Image (tube, rainbow, N blue to C red):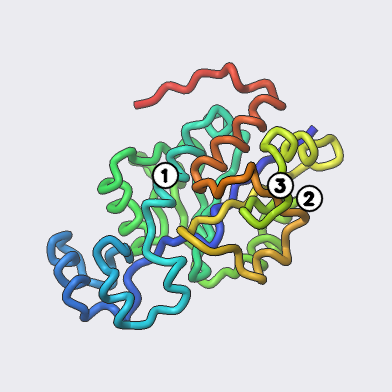
């Protein structure tokens, strides 16, 4: 049976404000409210939409939605699979930054606290536990998705979850791919609001599936896939204490 399961939130809409937007009034105003410099705050379409339009930002439709990552992490990190250290979670951003999630991380349920944590991570590159003994979050720059997959985690199977994949149920996807022949399975979920995975991401998938007929948000896909993994591994009765 599979010994390692990874979840990758790919092409994630999580980044600090690009330099070409830093002088725009919407960016400067929010930075002032947060007591930060414009280049330190997270790019957020809710605040920075005019700046993003004026700058003609590349891949505009995939950027400025850190809330998607917050929801996805809240779902993944509260599962029995993660709590029992049977799930590794990674974020690979649309701008080729890799975030490694440490064991036993409790992600803040408040978005504003999450925002503060991410701002600090982008600045400091690493966040450790209060005693300094455990790495909770670690950020690496300039790592392409291909480098991460082929030279980093190197799964036996890389399963893409996308609305343009082969239609299947979460139960079928898990039972078909988590087998005794695969020691390490990695599931990839998009961390962006619209569109599809890029060609550079798609070409690395062993296979790609779509759960159901509707386009589902990332956190819903994560919930369904991880629950089926827990059922297969007989963890679905395990209770997680929330704080």
Q: Nearer the viewer, mark 3 or mark 2?
A: 3
User: Reading the chain from its start, which is encountered first: label 2 or label 1?
Assistant: 1
Picture quarter containing residue 13?
A: bottom left
Residue 156 badge = 2
Horizontal and vertical percent position of residue 8? 58, 52
Residue 97 badge = none
Q: Residues within 10 Å of mark 1 (few under 14, many from 20)?
A: some
Label 3 close to label 2 by CB (< 8 Å): no
Horizontal and vertical percent position of residue 118? 35, 55
**In the rendered image, is residue 240 in sight?**
yes
Q: Residues within 10 Å of mark 2 (few under 14, many from 20)?
A: some
Residue 71 badge = 1
Say what secondary structure mark 2 lies in.
loop
The residue carrying mark 3 is 167
Quarter containing the N terminus: top right
Label 2 close to label 1 by CB (< 8 Å): no
């Amino acid at each position: 049976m599979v010994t390692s399961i990874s979840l990758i939130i790919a092409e994630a809409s999580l980044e600090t404000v690009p330099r070409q937007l830093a002088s725009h009034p919407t960016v400067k105003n929010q930075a002032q409210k947060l007591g930060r410099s414009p280049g330190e705050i997270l790019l957020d379409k809710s605040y920075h939409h005019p700046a993003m339009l004026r700058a003609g930002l590349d891949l505009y439709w995939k950027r400025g939605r850190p809330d998607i990552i917050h929801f996805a992490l809240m779902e993944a990190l509260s599962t029995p699979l993660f709590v029992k250290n049977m799930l590794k979670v990674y974020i690979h951003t649309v701008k080729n930054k890799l975030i490694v999630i440490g064991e036993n991380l409790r992600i803040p349920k408040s978005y504003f606290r999450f925002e503060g944590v991410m701002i600090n991570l982008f600045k400091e590159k690493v966040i450790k536990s209060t005693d300094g003994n455990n790495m909770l979050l670690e950020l690496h720059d300039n790592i392409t998705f291909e480098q991460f997959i082929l030279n980093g985690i190197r799964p036996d199977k890389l399963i893409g979850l996308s609305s343009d994949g082969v239609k299947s149920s979460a139960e079928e996807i898990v039972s078909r791919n988590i087998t005794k022949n695969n020691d390490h399975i990695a599931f990839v979920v998009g961390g962006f609001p619209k569109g599809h995975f890029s060609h550079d991401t798609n070409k690395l998938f062993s296979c790609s599936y779509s759960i159901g007929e509707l386009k589902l948000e990332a956190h819903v896909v994560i919930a369904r896939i991880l629950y089926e993994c827990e059922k297969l591994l007989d963890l679905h009765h395990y209770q997680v204490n929330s704080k």
